[in-house]
Image (cartoon, rainbow, N blue to C red):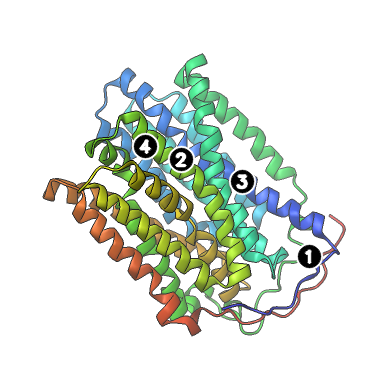
Amino acid sequence: MHTHSTPRASDSAAAPGRALGVLALCFFFNFVSRGVGDTFLVFLLPLQQEFGWQRAQMTSIYSVLMLVAGLASPAAGWVFERHGPRVLYAGGIGLLAAGLLIASHASALWQLYVGLGLFGGLGSGAIGMVPAAALLSWWFTTRLSTAIGVAYSAFGCGSLVMVPLSQALIDWQGWRMTYLSLGACLVGVGLLALALPWRAITAPRPAHGRAGTPGATASPLRAAMAQPRFWLLVQVMFFTALGMYLVLPQSVAYLIDVGFTPLQSATAVGAASMLSIAGVSGSGWASDRFTHRRAATASFVGTALGIGMLLALTYRRSEWLLVGYVLLFGICQGARGPVVASLSARLFAGHGQSTVYGAIYALMSMGAALGALLSGALHDWTGGYRAGFVLALACIALAAVPFWLSQAQLVPAAAPPLPRPNPTP
């Protein structure tokens, strides 16, 4: 599946600094997107203590945020294509800031649903991987998967930095002032987004309607949806998310149930999340070095082995099985994201590229939501975790199928070189 596309000017020595600058910018906005959203995990207990709401009511706010962020992705792609990254990024940061400011004054549950779930979800979706994948595809060709992998790793970094930082702020000044402080900081980030030199950042943007791309039609998304390769990428992402979220939501509770202490369980899950940063970055590099199919297959095998070790723990408690789960499941967690993002950027290059990837991302979020729902339902129906783990293994197998049974559909065509970027902002 290795491609031999012609390098663009931005891939050569002509503009390496600017290309790396665009990559750093995408990393930063992804960092904010996931990091700010995941801070809700440390706001949960203070909110519950103040208002006395049920835990299910509280956790559903986070579910709404994640679902809205995913479903908003096609709209984010449309705004990116129609109005450009300046409007999308500044608007997304503004929505995210407004959501936190609303939450800081919340006195009723519905206000948190509106502020964090709706505004936060829309803002997170607007500044996430959808515009990043398009921007990076204009600046990188031979190393696109590697660049997207680095940008994807910002999700994990954002959680690792913003979650403990928010906890420290809550301990210092309370949850309301922390939301207010974060919202005020985001207002400053929004002003920065408006002031960035977007003409220089978008200099290598391809012309609309390039021959052989979805841009030659009135509706790029409709054209993409008529191609089997679009649905193959959806299959990869939907079933990957479904399988992962059959495991993730109850992973800490499960490890406690099989005999590990709460501290051991939380540490294991946290360590797996940390390892995912290296895995996500490495999957992009592996795609460029060893082809998309080999990189994806290796990640699916690792995920399946990790889930298998969790399943084995239902029969026998073992520290070695726990370590194996942390290493394999952790490193491979999220590793398919850069692979599919780079494939989508190559297969649907040109006008409408962001909208197409946004649709794939939205359908992936539906798989994650369904997986989280089935995780709890299967536990309640069966009284245990084995059914969920077995179904997760089946989903991972279904996600890997397109890379082996439909290989020809997922081979990108070589793209013609784009003009050298305009050096003036």
Q: CA distance from mark 4 to mark 2?
A: 30 Å
SS for callout 3: helix
Residue 368 visible in the displayed image:
no
Residue 160 visible in the displayed image:
yes
Q: CA distance from mark 2 to mark 3?
A: 24 Å
For residue 29, which numbered disc appears in the image? 3
Where residue 414 sits, quadrant-wise, is bottom right
Closer to us: 388 or 47: 388
From the image, tell me which residue sits under label 4: 113
Q: Nearer the viewer, mark 2 or mark 1?
A: 2
Closer to us: 393 or 231: 393
SS for callout 2: helix
SS for callout 4: helix
Q: Name which residue lies at 50% across and 73% down.
A: 293
**N-terminal-most mark, 4 or 2:** 4
Q: Name which residue lies at 45% across and 75% down.
A: 403
Closer to us: 307 or 190: 307
Q: Residue 217 in the image: x percent, y percent? A: 56, 80
Looking at the picture, does residue 213 appear above or below residue 352?
Answer: below
From the image, tell me which residue sits under label 1: 10
Query: Which amino acid does the dot numbered 3 rest on?
Result: Phe
Q: Residue 10 in the image: x percent, y percent? A: 78, 65
Q: CA distance from mark 1 to mark 4?
A: 43 Å
For residue 271, which numbered disc appears in the image? 2
Query: Which amino acid does the dot numbered 4 rest on?
Result: Tyr
Q: Badge 4: how crowded within 10 Å, few (<14), some, or many (20+)?
A: many
Q: CA distance from mark 3 to mark 4?
A: 23 Å
**N-terminal-most mark, 2 or 1:** 1
Q: CA distance from mark 3 to mark 1?
A: 21 Å
Looking at the picture, does residue 349 appear above or below residue 185?
Answer: below
Q: Nearer the viewer, mark 3 or mark 4?
A: 3
